[in-house]
Amino acid sequence: MASEHGPEYLETELLIPDVPRLVHRYPSSLPTPSLHARWIEEEGLSLAFIEIGDVAMHVETTDDDVAWHLHADGHDGPLLEGTPWNDKTTTALLLWMEEFAAKVHSCIEMIDEDIFDAIDLFEAGATSAPISSVGFDPREWATFTKKDFQVFSVAAPGQAEPQIWTGAGEAWHLHDEERDGDAELIWTAPGADDHIHLGAVIVSPETGLAATFANPGVDWDEIGMSETDAMDWLLREHRNCVWASTIHDAVTEEVLKMLAGFTKPVVSPHR
């Protein structure tokens, strides 16, 4: 999606009302952190990942509590006892962190859903994704002001690949929660409830490259698609998921930088 004038950007409009400015500031003596966050629907839990140099802070926030811990050498490193900073810096960091984590927890669920809605529009070829009033009570929608609508722009990581399953029945991919990036190709025959596993895409931990593997014993005539075409379909699905995940993480990081006080809100010009 790059042009002769440079990379194309994707603009996501998000509704972020009632977000007050931070009272406590991030300590200027520390390096600017990398920020990530996740919403865990089943637990009503938000996770904030704050990477400060080679120290990673993990923050878990619920409606009732905030808990945190530190890792040395990145997010997968060993747990740290105490902090590597002096008392003044640690106190300032924790005051900022508690405010930041509370702001993330208050809006991450809605933001997460809206970012995925925006990605659906980007997948269809749009470069701007305004938020929809569908799903809001008209009276609630009328209470939002112009400053509640903000826009976040990120560079487009290429384009999604068109996907049509041309075989019989229905097919989808299922990600392996234990192995990030790996996924299986699942298929159901027309009118059937049971499903079978046709193959998998596996990402090499050494090279980061993806490869597909078809399961033995599959009747590809019944599937209505050749093994080669089915595995190509799965590989495109994998690439589309990576594309969507890249956009999701980039937009989320831009939102977090604003919530953390590192960037100023950009009010949507579309309202």
Image: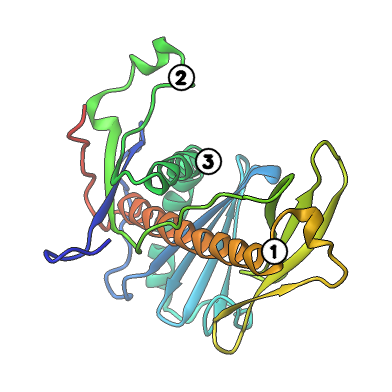
Alpha-carbon span between mark 1 and mark 2:
45 Å
- Residue type indicated by callout 2: Phe
* Residue 205 pos. (x, y %): 61, 84
Alpha-carbon span between mark 1 and mark 3:
41 Å
Residue under the image location 51 percent in, 77 percent down: 83
Q: In the rendered view, would you say 214 is above or below 233?
A: below
Tell which of 121 and 21 is nearer to you.
Answer: 121
The picture quadrant where one finds residue 203 is bottom right
Q: In the shown orientation, is residue 142 left or right of residue 219? A: left
The disc at residue 109 is 3
Q: Count how many numbered circles sit on residues in the image.
A: 3
**Residue beneath label 1, please?**
226
* Residue 157 pos. (x, y %): 35, 64
Q: In the rendered view, would you say 207 is above or below 245?
A: below
- Residue type indicated by callout 3: Glu
**Residue beneath label 2, please?**
136
The picture quadrant where one finds residue 218 is bottom right
| Label 2 Cα crowd, 10 Å radius (few <14 / some 14-19 / many 20+) | few
Residue under the image location 54 percent in, 63 percent down: 236
